[in-house]
Structures are given as C-alpha cells and as structure tokens.
C-alpha cells in the first residue's frame, strides 16, 4: 500500500470492522501533534468524511509542501517542533541562528531543491563575512562554533522534513565543517586564588567568589540562591533555581538540567561566613541587586567587576566559568572521585565530567607513576621533592616566595558601607543613606574626632538601621498577608 502524502491524514481498519481516519490539526505546547478522527462503515465513506474534516479545520499545515521555501519550513519547524522543548536561553540562540542567518541567506530556496552545495556555500559565507554586529571588535566572519551551530540547526530541521515526507534525503548530511575546537580550560593557582580572594574582599565580593570556589556552582545558580535555601543547622545548600538574562531583563528559571537541581553540603567555615553575611541581608536573595531592591542581581553585571578583581589581584585573565573548572581541578587533585564531583557540579552523568576533566595535572601524573612503581616494581619510590636550600637561603626563599599582597584600594567604598569625610581639623562625619520600607531614602549621620572612631560609629549605626528596616519590612509584610 502506497504511503499517503504529508497532510492527507491516515486511514485504517479497526478491529471492530469500522474504518477510522485521523488527521493532525495542530501541535501541543510540548510539540506533540493534536489529532481529530472520523469513523465510517466503508473506506470510501471514511475518505469523504476525513476530507470534510480537513476542510472544516482549515489546517495550517496545508501550506507544508515539498516546494515551500526553506525559510518557511525552518520557521514552522522551530515554532512547532523545537521551541516547545527547549529552555528560554537556548531558544534565544536558535532564534539568532534562524532569523538572523539561515532564513536571510538561504530561506528563499525551495525545500525540495535545497542541495548540499547550497549549504556548503552558506557556511563559507558565514565564515567569511556573516557577522551582523560588533564587526569592529570581532571581525567580519563568524566563529567556527557558530558555523557548526547553524549547520546543526539546519540538519535537525531537514531531518524532520524527511520524516514528515516532504523530502526524501537530508542534504545537510556529509557537509564539510570547520574543525571542532575545545575551549582552553584555565584554572587559577593556589597563590592566584589567595590574591583573588583578598582583592574580592576589599571590593565587597568575598562571599560570592568564595562560595563559587568552594562549590563550583554555575553563576546563575549562585545568583538564584535565597536564604531559605541555606540550612545552617545541617550545612545543606539547596539549588532550586537560577537567574538568567533574557534581553534586557533578568528571569528566574529552573536550573539547566534535572541533575542541576541538587543539594550540597557546605564546609563549616563557609557556613560561618554566610551567617555573618546574612546579618546585613535586606531581602530574601543571598546576593541581591545593588540597584533594584528586592530583586536578584543581573548576571552580566558581574563580568566587569570580576575582570577588575583579576587584574588588581595580578591574576591571569580567565572566564567566570573557569572558576568552576578551578574548583573541579582542586577537587580531583585532592582525591575526590569523578562520580561525587559530577553530582556536586550538577552534570547529567559522570561520563560528562570525565570527558571535560580528562586532563590530569602534573601532580596527579607524578603521584600515579610513583604508586605504580611502588606496587609493581617493589621499590621505595617517593614523590620527587625539590632540594632544600641552606638555612640562610631558606629564610630568603620564604621571604620572596609569596610576598605579602596588598589589595588595590579604590576610591569608591563598598556598597552599603556609607561614606566618611572630614569636616574640619577636629571633626569627621559619617553618612548612611538607605532606602526605607516606604521606598524613600533617608539620611543618617554620625560624628567623631578621628576617622577611625567615625568608621566604627558608622558601622555600628548601619547595622542598627539595617536591622530596624528589616524588622519594619517584616511587619508590613505580615500586615499585608
């Protein structure tokens, strides 16, 4: 029996002897098809009823034909098959590829006439001059990764066209693509971590970056933490949401994957630091926005500050995600197994973790070589250690090995610490200008004879005012409920 064409529906004989016809009339939010059916005593009657049903429903897929423009098929595939199943952040990437690159370049070619050569030339144009903005910074051509992503999108959409009977073969199969290059993974050294945290503390970001280096959480996951997620009694930290950027707005979404929803156990020192940090909390978010009260921080707002801290701490330039790699590398070097690490950082499987961290540090290689030699060769091999210098040389080495790091002290004070200035030779003034529960700002002052006394009085006053504001907000919330 010949296969019916796409859009004609299906007709089959049921066990009770009646004929049934079904046709797709749309798609659900999850991408699955919605169908309607008719029944009849004979096949001929069933065909007539099915045709009437199609005309009555006015199917939007009547325009889906083999000679339809490839751009129309890309749009239909994305809206009905792809979009309902992907996260919003991923959806933005798809929209960029489809509507900024694929459709403008090859969207007018009939679906059934699209060839591998058309796609190959399209990829070449992307590589040579496909960039539409920020050309002055990145050049005219798109990256190899972007070209490969456009190919993946085309191939997936064309594969669906094959299964729907619109075309017989997928022209995207066999295309030559730029080589896949893994991003270079960089990690901070122990000395860089020490300087980085000292500088972060100076700029008011110590708790945030220490938590990142202690847990390896994703940036959006840390920003999505609320105080109810921290159990100070058990040390548990629950990761239940993340903050992502969509356009100019921030959104609260579920974590990246199901395995990203997890619970971590924090070290006691980290818990103590968070408990101290909570004393100055003004809302439910652990790391709230400094400009929008009661909202989480914008993920993009951290980039500039992160790079400044790295530079001022005399660290090499790394991505924020490399702090996650730094945590994972330290964990492996200190004996954590792959399965435990995978669960901690929220990977789908231990295989994913193993693929990413397949590199072995020099220290781990030397230790493995010594262990094998000891077990198999029967020797008393030990880890090679550097020759110790004489006492006088040792003292000089200790003095120069890790020089004391003096953090850069900017002119701008940390957020929430007020300001201090000298009025005259014998008087200093400290000011704090918080936002009150009614939404308006109010100024509070303290005075002292020296800067040190003024700083101490100001810190005490700020703590009191923050506690009063938090208490008043809680009362107002209870009254509203």
Image (tube, rainbow, N blue to C red):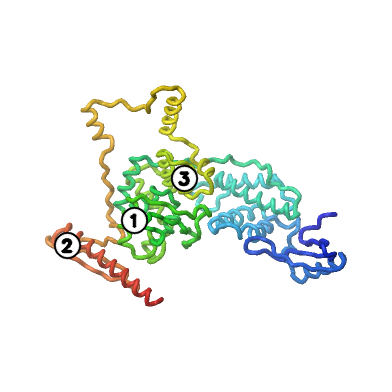
Q: Residue 304 or 276: which is nearer the viewer?
A: 276
Give how far across and how far down residue 318 sits, in percent: 42, 44
Which is in the foreground here, disc 3 or disc 1? Answer: 3
Q: Which labelled disc corresponds to residue 320?
A: none
Left/right of residue 169 with respect to residue 30 in the rendered view: right
Q: Report helix, strand or loop for mark 1.
A: helix
Residue drawn at (43%, 48%), measured in percent from left and top? 216
Residue drawn at (36%, 46%), measured in percent from left and top? 310
Work out whether 194 lies above or below 111: above
First in sequence, mark 1 or 2: give its number: 1
Give how far across and how far down residue 399 sits, in percent: 24, 35
Q: Which labelled disc corresponds to residue 428?
A: 2
* Label 3 Cα crowd, 10 Å radius (few <14 / some 14-19 / many 20+): few
Asked if residue 152 shows in the view, the reply is yes
Which is in the foreground here, disc 2 or disc 3? Answer: 3
Q: How many marks?
A: 3
**As drawn, which residue projects farthest toward the left?**
426
Q: Report helix, strand or loop for mark 2.
A: strand
* Label 2 Cα crowd, 10 Å radius (few <14 / some 14-19 / many 20+): many
Which residue is denoted by mark 1 in the rendering? 274
First in sequence, mark 3 or 1: give its number: 1
Which residue is denoted by mark 3 in the rendering? 340
Work out whether 59 lies above or below 369: below
* Label 1 Cα crowd, 10 Å radius (few <14 / some 14-19 / many 20+): some
């Amino acid at each position: 029996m010949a296969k019916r064409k796409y859009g004609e529906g299906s007709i089959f004989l049921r066990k009770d002897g009646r004929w049934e016809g079904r046709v797709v009339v749309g798609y659900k939010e999850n991408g699955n098809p919605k169908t309607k059916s008719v029944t009849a005593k004979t096949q001929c009657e069933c065909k007539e009823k099915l045709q009437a049903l199609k005309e009555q429903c006015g199917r939007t897929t009547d325009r889906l034909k083999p000679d339809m423009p490839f751009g129309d098929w890309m749009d239909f595939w994305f809206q009905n098959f792809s979009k309902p199943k992907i996260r919003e952040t991923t959806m933005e990437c798809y929209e960029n590829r489809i509507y900024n690159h694929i459709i403008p370049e090859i969207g007018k070619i009939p679906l059934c006439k699209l060839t591998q050569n058309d796609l190959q030339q399209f990829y070449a144009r992307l590589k040579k001059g496909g960039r539409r903005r920020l050309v002055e910074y990145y050049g005219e051509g798109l990256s190899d990764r972007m070209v490969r992503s456009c190919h993946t999108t085309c191939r997936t959409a064309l594969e669906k066209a094959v299964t729907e009977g619109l075309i017989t073969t997928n022209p995207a199969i066999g295309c030559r693509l730029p080589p896949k290059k893994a991003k270079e993974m960089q990690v901070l050294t122990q000395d860089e971590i020490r300087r980085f945290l000292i500088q972060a503390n100076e700029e008011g970001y110590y708790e945030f970056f220490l938590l990142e280096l202690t847990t390896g959480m994703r940036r959006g996951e840390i920003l999505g933490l609320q105080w109810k997620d921290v159990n100070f009694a058990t040390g548990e930290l629950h990761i239940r949401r993340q903050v992502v950027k969509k356009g100019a707005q921030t959104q609260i979404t579920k974590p990246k994957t199901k395995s990203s929803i997890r619970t971590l156990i924090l070290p006691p020192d980290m818990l103590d630091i968070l408990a101290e940090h909570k004393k100055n909390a003004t809302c439910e978010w652990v790391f709230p926005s400094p400009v929008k009260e009661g909202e989480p921080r914008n993920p993009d707002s951290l980039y500039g500050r992160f790079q400044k801290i790295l530079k001022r701490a005399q660290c090499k330039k790394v991505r924020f995600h490399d702090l996650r790699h730094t945590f994972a590398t330290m964990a492996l070097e200190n004996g954590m197994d792959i399965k435990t690490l995978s669960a901690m950082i929220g990977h789908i499987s231990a295989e994913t973790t193993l693929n990413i961290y397949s590199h072995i540090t020099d220290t781990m290689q030397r230790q493995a070589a010594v262990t094998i030699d000891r077990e198999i060769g029967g020797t008393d091999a030990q880890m090679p250690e550097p020759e110790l210098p004489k006492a006088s040389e040792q003292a000089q080495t200790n003095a120069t090995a890790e020089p004391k790091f003096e953090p850069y002290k900017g002119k701008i004070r940390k957020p929430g610490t007020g300001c201090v200035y000298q009025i005259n030779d014998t008087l200093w003034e400290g000011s704090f200008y918080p936002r009150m529960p009614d939404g308006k700002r109010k100024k509070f002052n303290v005075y002292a004879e020296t800067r040190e006394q003024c700083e101490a009085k100001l810190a005490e006053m700020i703590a009191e005012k923050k506690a009063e504001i938090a208490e008043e907000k809680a009362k107002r919330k209870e009254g509203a409920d």
